[in-house]
Image (spheres, grey):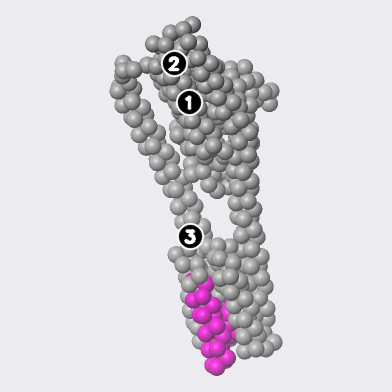
Amino acid sequence: MRVPDRPEAATGVEPGAVFRSRVAVGVGLGAVFRFRVAVGVGLGAVFRSRVAVGVGLGAVFAVAVAFQAYQVADAWGAGYWPFGALVAASVCALALVRRRARLWTAVAGLAVAASAVLVTRLVHLPAEPSPAASLGLAVLAASAVRTLPVRTACAVAVAGPAVVAGAVLANPGSAVPVVSGLLWLAALAAGGGLRLLAARRRAVAGRVRRAERLELARELHDVVAHHITSIVLQAQAAQLVTAKHPERTAGSLADIEAAGSEALAATRHVVGLLRDAVPAAEGRERLGELVEGFESHGRRAHLRLDADPDGWPPQVSSTVYRVVREALTNVSRHAPDARAVTVRVTQHARTVTVEVEDDAPRTPARRYRRAGYGLTGYGLGGYGLIGMRERLEALGGTLTAGPRPGSGWSVRATIPTGGHR
């Protein structure tokens, strides 16, 4: 009995292999270009939002300084408002450029406020830090507490009450230091809350990654068992062939070597991933059930499957299923106005491409909610796609997402099949 030769064990160069490799390189470069464009769009949106926040905050500071100067001039006289306005403008200017050096802008703002307290004590000016200066200090404090290391943030948080205490001693009976203290406490609460929220998101992302690794580790058993079984069968067949046809031993050994190489490659992929996977056999029926389940929520969904899922390796089948499921889940959560979704799965020579597109109108709220998973992979949400992106990158694939021209959202994933058809 002769064991059928494996295509992978055949000698010689496959016709058209060079052409397909060049096409694959071109497709890969195109994907890299599109990804960079998407990242650029996302970074541009972040930059524009920061500029808008800075302009709005500057307007608030300007109004606060002007109103404070008017009140001081009305209550104390025309010669008393310039010093307080200068101090407040200095602190507010530091607050506007805080992102360049959060620690040193906070230290400089506190130093300006402390110096102002001493000056008011010596020359009998209105109490400092004034409400406008306290507003700038509050922004500096919130920013420092939110982003700086724990010890440094605590030092900044403690320095504020010290300045307020000095203001109370320098101006006993004044209500201005009380306002400063309240604004400082509000800043600490806001900065601490944002810090805890960021820590919670990092913890959730970490748990998602660990869950991905643990469940895919369970898939490792199935993958290894499949390939080891193939090797054992090849070895048993080789024993029979060698006994009857010794001249065919070399071919049998080549088959075993090819099966072992496949086993090592598949095991390396799965061990490298150590992430989540659905059951190994997620074929045409499972994808159809997934799309039908999405349609049960009152939206139209169409599956275009130009591929043969039965011929995919287990890790490819499970990844395709997970990408489609995650994309449909995000449409359900973040695109309530979408009425139709198209799921397209296409198989090429050595890759499988998954595209999920919806027709929801583009809105600023949706763009910002989904920027975390769509354009940059970081930020506000999309914890499920954190694991998906890492899974695809470990498999040698890519995951990109972003707004479609005109309207709608698109998710596109490419998964290498390792030459399997």
* Residue receiving disc 1: 260
Residue 159 placement (x, y as % from top left): 59, 77
Q: Quadrant of residue 301?
A: top right
**Residue 252 circle label:** 2
Residue 29 placement (x, y as % from top left): 35, 34
For marks 1 and 3, the one nearer the N-term is 3
For marks 2 and 3, the one nearer the N-term is 3
**Secondary structure found at label 2:** helix
Q: CA distance from mark 1 to mark 3?
A: 63 Å
- The 10 Å Cα crowd at callout 1, few under 14, some 14 to 19, many 20 or more, is some
Residue 312 placement (x, y as % from top left): 52, 21
Question: Of discs 2 and 1, which sits in the foreground?
Answer: 2
For badge 2, the amino acid type reads Ser
Looking at this rendering, what residue extends furthest in the bottom direction? 122
Between residue 200 and residue 296, name the one nearer to us.
200
- The 10 Å Cα crowd at callout 2, few under 14, some 14 to 19, many 20 or more, is many
Image vertical order of residue 378 relative to residue 93, above or below: above
Q: Which residues are magenta?
A: 105-132
